[in-house]
Image (cartoon, grey):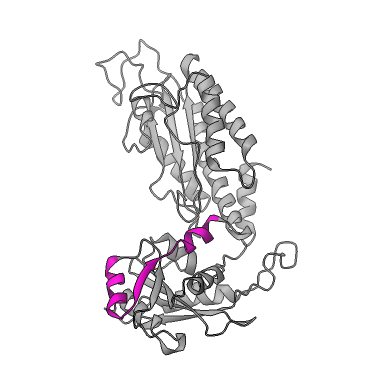
Amino acid sequence: MSEDDATATDHAKNPRPLRTDLRPIVEAVRDADAAAFVAVGDRFDDDLRYLSRFAGPDRPSALVVVPTGEATADTVGRAVLCAPALFGEQAEREFVASARASHESGSGGPTDDEVGFHDGVAREVRTERVGDHAGERAAAAAADPAGGASGDGERVLTPASIPHDAAVYLERAGFEPASTEAVATARARKTPAERDRIRRVQRATVAGIARAEAVLADCEAVDEGSEETAAGRADDDRRPPLRWDGEPLTTERLRREVNAALAARGVRDAGNTVIGAGPSAADLHYVGDDPVRPGETVLLDVSPRGPDGYYGDATRTFVVDGDGGWARRAYVAVEAAREAALDEVEPGVPAKTVHGEAAAELAAYGFDPNAGEGEAGFTHGTGHGVGVSLHE
């Protein structure tokens, strides 16, 4: 199946529903002998997005998870999402209703991982009044008599990144905030629905890179004797820029083509499409509009975000009309290192082992992992996790 066919299939069928099992959070609260778990953040807070599945505004929301007095087979706790004013219906839909919804797979029945989802955590939404602070509402929800918390010196677990003002509201209510790694631990292992989202956005990522490759393949190198184009520089001996569709090709033109391909596949570039050419290809965070010249490396780092908040990521390097040499050796070295690293990937294998294999293979090709500033070598990581954060 081609990438376009796979993308069309992605849009044609309903994705698996995203549901976050809140039982690990309840268990962390119990194990710490705490009163509740509290997270506060806006739409850019990845922990809160993961826990609530609420894609709210840039105004803060709060999630409070409280264990029940006595856990039963049906109920282990309750979760309250304090949503900003005017966003109650959306919060009900994304936080409460989606956790109850059944899902029919394309085969005509529910899949094994989706049958009877029930984490034993009752969910509700409380809408803030305009002007309320999410931290203040969170403190009130944690001290709600229904949760059994008094706020009299009791511990409340929070992510390490909780806003300072929210922590102050909790302290004023008599709680003692304490950070927990429970959310990070839960996010580390992806559910089938999460893996499905990552595969979808990664296919779009590959399609974006394929578009850049097609543009580069369609370019024409200007003859050395031709007049320098407006996008080039006449004060050095570098070759004139490539021409595409009758105009000089620049990194910004190429970036727009990639981003258009991403948008056509239903994902956002999220400001993460990095393209460098020539000297700027050495900058993994480059933002600019440089001419793309034949014989020089072109770096693409494409990291879009899908509609459910999950990222894809891929980096590729191209050379148009090159002479082989260093660029060809680097390509062969990276290809060999990638295969060596993938051979080590198994459940339970430390990431540093995978990285070590890649580094050893690159060193065998002359790319020293301990290279200094300005020296050719392996000066980057092997990879990283992706999820609701670009780097997990």
Closer to the camera in the image, 348 or 97: 348
Give residue 98's position: percent from left, percent from top. Answer: 56, 73
Query: Relative to residue 110, is residue 326 drawn left or right?
Result: left
Say which of 74 and 15 sits in front.
74
Overall secondary structure of the magenta stretch?
A: helix
Q: Residue at x 39, y 82 (%)?
A: 141
User: Does any portion of residue 53 appear in the rendered image?
Assistant: no
Q: Residue at x 45, y 86 (%)?
A: 148
Q: Residue furthest top?
A: 225
Residue 263, above or below 108 = above
Residue 184 drawn in magenta = yes
At horizontal 54% and vertical 26% (from top left) the residue drawn is 360
- 194, above or below 72, in the image: above
Q: Quadrant of the N terminus?
A: top right
Report which quarter residue 42 is drawn in: bottom left
Q: Does residue 316 appear to the left or right of 283 in the view shown?
A: right
Q: Is residue 265 magenta?
A: no
Q: Horizontal and vertical percent for residue 146?
A: 46, 88
The span shown in magenta is 164-188
Q: Nearer the viewer, residue 335 or 359?
A: 359
Could you say where residue 358 lies in the image, as x and y percent from the top left?
Answer: 54, 31
Q: Name the spot of residue 232 as percent of width and height, x first.
A: 30, 23
Question: Is residue 145 visible to us here?
Answer: yes
Which residue is most to the right?
Answer: 108
Q: Quadrant of residue 287?
A: top left
